[in-house]
Amino acid sequence: MKSIVLIRLIRCAGRLFLGLSLLGVSTGWGRPLEIYFIDVLGGAAVLIVTPQGESVLIDSGWPGEEDRDLNRIHDTLVTKAGCSKLDYLITTHWHRDHYGNVLPLSRRVPIGVFYDRGIPDSFEEDATFFRRMIEEYQQATGGRSKVLRPGDFVDLKQDPDGLPLSLVCVAANRQVIRLQGAEENPACERAEPQAEDFSDNARSIALLLSYGDFQFFSGGDITWNIETRLVCPVNTVGPVDLYMVNHHGADSSNNPVFLRSLDPIAAVMCNGPAKGGSPATIQRLKDLPGLQALYQLHWNIQIPKEQNTAAGFIANPDPQTSGQYIMASVAPDTKSFVVTFGKDTNPRTFLCR
Ligand SMILES: [Zn+2]
């Protein structure tokens, strides 16, 4: 509860700073906040670079594939974002499309703090792979990874003259952040639970990034019922400006009540040509009254083109090529954000709430 109150305070402080800027009072704004959705072909790897130059990587893509994802993550961090180290690496859960490159990445750049949902003693879903990969993970972290729990903040540097910045864990290990005493969310009347999901997806770490008036939700692969618990009976996370579509766009996630409650202005789906991007999820997103743009990293080539998002919103429109990332860049006054393919292709500006 303390945490969510803090988030609300941070939001209020953001509005105060915005007010100061409109009055012409200098707030010493520097570089924008940048979010890179790296193309790891149906896995996940999202890099956040803060106005203070700190870097947070959420997940590290698939292992192997001749270091395809490793090279893309490294190139984005070092060449595109200009970072010489990674300050935080958060692994949302223990599926191989999310923690494939922790050890090799740690050999290329220094990594400050490793966060995860907790390391289970055994992992029936993927036992053989997990045994090997968790050994590598422990080697990379030196056994010093930290567990992120709902309500925990990643300790990002603040700009004393800039707008408040926070990254808070809102769900992990099937637990969700709680807010008591607030108004109930009327959308919950329509909530329909699904059969309980006992896979590791439901245990994913979900995060809310706040920077002034800008809110970004990134929920790993959380599924239907966990999503509902994040917004019912009280909406603890929405509304947001930018939504990283849960679970690569799978339709066992992205339930309509959750999406309505997040009410995003723009959404980015980290799908592959043949992974994620379910037509049901895409339709639910298109049906959101406030959504101005749905981005996909790829076409879902298994469904008709028209069931995907519009052509100009696909980062890698040629099925023969891949590797183009989607970037969101939040203006230092947090009044707006720009979404591009790569650093500057096809820019579109969205106003924050
Ligand atoms: Zn996944």
Image: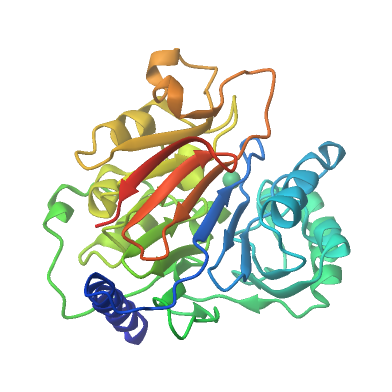
Which residue does the image show at 12% across and 71% down from the upper left? 183
Outermost residue on the front side: it is 24
- Picture layout, residue 200 above or below residue 302: below
Viewed as shown, does residue 185 lie left or right of 240?
Answer: left
- Residue 170, percent from left and from top: 42, 69
Nearer-the-camera pick, 155 or 230: 155
Residue 199 visible to an observer of this rendering = no
Ligand 1 lies in which image quarter?
top right
Which residue does the image show at 43% across and 50% down from the upper left? 223
- Residue 27, percent from left and from top: 38, 78
Which residue does the image show at 29% across and 55% down from the upper left? 352
- Picture layout, residue 260 above or below residue 32: above
Which quadrant of the figure has residue 111? Answer: bottom right
- Picture layout, residue 67 above or below residue 77: above
Residue 105 visible to an observer of this rendering = yes
- Picture layout, residue 141 above or below residue 155: above
Q: Quadrant of the N terminus?
A: bottom left
Viewed as shown, does residue 132 lie left or right of 49?
Answer: right
Nearer-the-camera pick, 225 or 158: 158
Viewed as shown, does residue 35 lie left or right of 136?
Answer: left
Which quadrant of the figure has residue 58? Answer: bottom right
Nearer-the-camera pick, 66 or 233: 66
- Residue 56, percent from left and from top: 61, 65
- Residue 115, percent from left and from top: 64, 72
Number of marks in picture: 0
> What's the coloring here?
rainbow
Which residue does the image show at 29% across and 80% down from the upper left? 13
Q: Quadrant of the C terminus?
A: bottom left
Viewed as shown, does residue 28 lie left or right of 93?
Answer: left
